[in-house]
Image (tube, coloured by chain):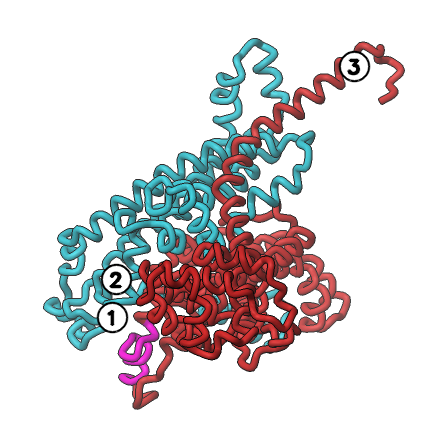
Amino acid sequence: MSNPELTPDEIKQADRNRRRSKLLATLFVVPLLVFIFVTFVAPIGTMLYRSFYHPTVSELIPNTLEALDDWSEDGSELPPNPTLNIFAVELKSLFEERLSGKLAEEINRALPGSSSLIKSTARLVSRADTAELETGGAALLFDSNSKWQQIELWQAIKKAGSVFTADYYLTALDLERSPSGEIVQRGTQIYLDLYWKSLKIAFYITLLTALIGFPLAWYLANAPTRIANTLMIFVLLPFWTSLLVRTTSWIALLQTNGVVNSTLQTLHIISEPLEMMYTQFATVIAMTHILLPFMILPLYSVMKGIDPSYFRAALSLGAKPIPAFIRIYLPMTVPGFSAGALLVFIISIGYYITPALVGGTEGQMISNLIAFHMQSSNNWELAAALGSLLLLLITLLYWLYDRLVGISNLKLG
Amino acid sequence: MVQFPRYFTLWQKLGLTGVKLTAWLVLLFLMAPILVIIPLSFNAEPYFTFTQGMLALDPEAYSLKWYQEILADDKWLLAIKNSFYIGFMATIIATVLGTTAAIGLTRADMPFQRMIMALLLSPMIVPVIITAAGMFFFYSQLDIAGSYIGVILAHAALGTPFVVITVNAALAGFDYSLVRASLGMGARPVYTFFKVIMPLIRPGVISGALFAFVTSFDEVIVVLFLAGPEQRTIPRQMFSGLREEINPTILAVATLLVILSGLLLFTMEYLRARSEKMRSGTA
């Protein structure tokens, strides 16, 4: 800032003013920033933390794990007897608190097949006195089952007891650790298949919305204003209608005895009802319907701004309509396409409600499995790991959207 | 209708007619599923499909009993009350915070503007299943899971991006010298806000508030994860209805919701027309 007409004092004053307005602008944003941090960012952070933080075992058998700290799991020796005694005592109290099943489940994850061993041993040690276990617990364990003399079992207990683990990410990527500690692919692919299927479903939906959204957006952009405004209501009404309502409609339409089947049967087009509900087809068609406005609106606003004289000029210069359309008109709609397609893809990849209600098992997406692990199997850490991977994918797409479209250009309605 | 230029050949005219026909079919695809549930909600039988009597327009085949059932069911009444209460509270929080933030963000000298914007809009982009899972973990620690506060805060967070976007759009082209003029003539900042800024951005604020309300009103996943039986909302009730025992009460509720969204759409269009008028008036 070297304006010769300003005195140093004036420059200082201007600087101060600028700083003040900067501060003022920041002060306006701070309340929302704090609010979003507390209500939204912190929960997401907690979820990321949960995906590798797993204190369950260390809360169940804290003393055993502390004693196992001094034991080297690489060696060929079993943990010393005092450690085993401590374990026997803890197992007895877990049994009395009805928590030994939980421990068995956790250890079983580290060493498959050890669940029943732990449950039966817990029952056995619970009959002994605590004082007796404090000295002879190790012997009792060895008597009850020779498996307690296997080093792998103690390695598994120590591993299950570590508070931080990347195992849930391995599971979420269909990997596992072999007994020798290498990371290998698991026999059955569950989660990668599901990610792949979610991407495929999202892609189909994006493609479908683009294909059927284009003619309508074009028609709306080129029809006389009065007609276009009226027809726009038919695009916006579904947009404003509750998601649950639209999903309900598709259930009413696609059911075995639903509107589509009974119409087709009345018209004698089919004799047996088609099985459309609880399929991937149902997920794709219902979600295409739900997300179509997100494609039409950006396409429409871009097409509205395209000067028709370019196309006319191409025609009058002798271009055939179809090549002129492909080479002149279509490239100008690309901003609308990319905005709509990215938005539809981002929204559909993490969709939960519609696949859950109409998709059956075949039409499930990754979100449904996250919900399953949150609500039914109570494997929250795995749900968090699956969610973190999905979040990574969405963040990449969001970044792409910001680069290509600019998030501040996002228009609503 | 689109006029054909006179130099178009028959094939080109046919092609264009084909495109128009497709456009109308797509409109039908958009509207038909929503319209079909309205008559179905008057079904006298507990089916999700048209009965012979309904097709023959027999008055006996139609009834209002599913609507009466809503009014007789405490669960639905509680859900309706909850939806409005939670939506209303979340909207107030989202609108106040979102509007102030948007005003700060439109100042060109705001530091890290792009990054902050990306962060503030992210609740709209992150899949709600992830947000809901995270909120379940975090809000349980704060002991506000299963409470109205928890659900209201969560819904407010999900609604703020919409307020930021609409107010941001309303502020585009806002002349800040008006604010300076007002302050320079001795008006207090709060007075300036309500008398100078607010009247100019009001359509944007209201449409943002409507978006925030709809976001809360329509939200199920957070409610599934965070709310106890006390906080069940309309969509939550519909979700379990569709999963457990499907009966046409859901269709009756859905019909009422379609009417509500029609009203909302009408309000939004009215606001849009007004803000366009206002913009062309000041330009």
Say above or below: A397 vs A144.
Answer: above
Between residues A249 and B273, which one lies in front from this camera angle?
A249
Q: Residue A12 carries which label?
A: 3
Chain that the image shows in red? A
Q: How far apart are marks 1 and 2 (CA)?
A: 8 Å
Q: Give the range drawn in magenta.
A: A253-266
Decide: is A59 above or below A30. Answer: below
Occupied quadrant, residue A181: bottom right
Q: Do the residues labelled 1 and 2 touch (CB within 8 Å)?
A: yes
Q: Name the residue under label 1.
A: B48
Element under disc 3? helix
Residue B251 got which mark? 2
Asked whether residue B191 appears in the rendered view, the answer is: yes
Q: Quadrant of the N terminus of chain A?
A: top right
- For label 3, the crowd category at 10 Å Cα-Cα, with few meaning under 14, some 14 to 19 and many 20 or more, is few
Quadrant of residue B51 in the image?
Answer: bottom left
Q: Which of marks 1 and 2 is nearer the N terminus?
A: 1
Q: Tell us which disc is closer to us: 3 or 1.
A: 3
In the rendered view, would you say B115 is above or below A75? Answer: above
Output the letter for the chain in cyan: B
